[in-house]
């Protein structure tokens, strides 16, 4: 039986990641210029800080519908609550620690981007032009640019053929979601098997009661049966006539009597 776990450490881990994510976004917004003019190289030419605003989903993807952003933000709010509640339920059910840490990463990423979508349109004024309302239309701040390839996709590639493509720019919240989902997909076998043999399975109280009742009935029946067998054997032995073998002296006396007669 898996032991129930306290969900507080996993919620605290998510909260710390949310703080780091929000701090990085606000620092980028305050101190960096958007686009290539404000780009900062971290490791050579392939890892950079590049400030961009993402009006859509993770890794720069967008929804083209007029109310697509509103639907996406509402979906993120529902997903955030669902993931948090599910993680708490799994912790109390004794789920694997690895699974709980992965869900904590996903929860942190979901909340981090929800904060941007919900409030940044009002607090930072970065809602796209023509948005019905700045609430729930804030643009997510992305800044991590792993620039290992860019160029035009060949025309023979379906859907994206002929378009210019660059490596997606993302943020810490996106990274948390990506790492959490990949961890669950890769290690799901160990997540579900962990704890299966930690403790012997406890028997149901009713089963234990029935087994004890069976043992007690056997303890009363078996000695009685043994006593019956013993008495029957002893009585049969007493009823059977026995003859003692003649002693040598008796045989001599019998021979003497026969001669005299």
Image (cartoon, rainbow, N blue to C red):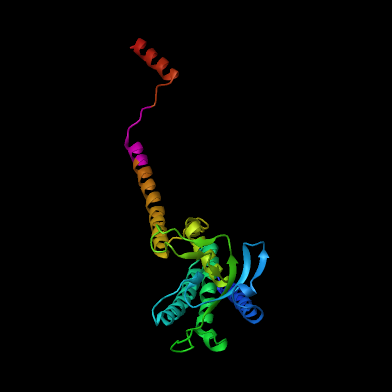
Quadrant of residue 214 in the image?
Answer: bottom left
How far across and down, in percent of the image, does residue 51 sit?
Answer: 59, 75
In this rendering, does residue 200 appear at all?
A: no
| Magenta-drawn stretch contains 134 | no
User: What is the x, y in percent for residue 141?
Assistant: 56, 77
Q: Give the quarter of the figure containing the C terminus.
A: top left
Please tell me which residue is depicted at 36% across the width and 14% down the height of the picture.
257
Span highlighted in magenta in the image: 233-243
Residue sitting nearer the eye, 245 or 95: 95
* Residue situated in front as seen by the camera: 147 or 175: 147
- Reply above or below: 212 against 51: above
Position of 46 with respect to 157 (left or right) is right
Left or right: 219 with respect to 11? left
Relative to the observer, which residue lies in front, 180 or 151? 151
The residue shown at (53%, 81%) is 116
Q: Residue 169: percent from the left, percent from the top?
A: 55, 69
Magenta span includes 237: yes
Judge whether 134 appears above or below 96 on screen: below
Say if 38 sits above or below 166 in the image: below
Q: From this viewpoint, is residue 39 visible?
A: yes
The percent position of residue 198, horizontal first and vertical second, equals: 53, 57
Residue at x 37% of width, y 52% of height:
221
* Majority secondary structure in the magenta region: helix
Left or right: where 260 falls relative to 108:
left
Residue 19 lies in quadrant: bottom right
Residue at left offset 38%, top offset 16%? 254
Name the foreground residue: 117 vs 15.
117
């Amino acid at each position: 039986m898996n032991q129930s776990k306290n969900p507080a450490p996993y919620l605290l881990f998510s909260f710390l990641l949310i703080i780091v994510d929000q701090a990085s976004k606000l620092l980028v917004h305050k101190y960096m210029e958007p686009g290539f003019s404000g780009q900062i190289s971290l490791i050579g030419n392939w890892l950079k800080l590049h400030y961009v605003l993402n009006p859509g989903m993770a890794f720069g993807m967008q929804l083209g519908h007029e109310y697509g952003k509103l639907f996406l933000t509402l979906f993120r709010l529902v997903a955030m609550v669902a993931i948090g509640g599910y993680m708490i339920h799994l912790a109390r059910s004794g789920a694997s620690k690895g699974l709980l840490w992965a869900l904590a990463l996903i929860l942190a990423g979901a909340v981090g981007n929800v904060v941007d979508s919900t409030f940044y349109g009002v607090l930072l004024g970065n809602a796209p032009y023509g948005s019905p309302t700045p609430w729930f239309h804030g643009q997510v701040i992305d800044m991590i640019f792993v620039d290992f390839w860019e160029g035009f996709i060949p025309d023979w590639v379906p859907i994206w053929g002929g378009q210019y493509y660059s490596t997606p720019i993302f943020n810490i919240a996106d990274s948390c979601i990506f790492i959490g989902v990949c961890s669950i997909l890769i290690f799901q076998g160990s997540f579900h098997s962990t704890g299966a043999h930690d403790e012997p399975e406890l028997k149901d109280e009713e089963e234990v009661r029935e087994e004890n009742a069976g043992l007690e009935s056997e303890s009363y029946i078996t000695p009685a049966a043994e006593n019956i067998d013993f008495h029957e054997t002893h009585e049969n032995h007493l009823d059977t006539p026995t003859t003692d073998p003649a002693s040598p002296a008796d045989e001599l006396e019998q021979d003497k009597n026969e001669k005299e007669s």
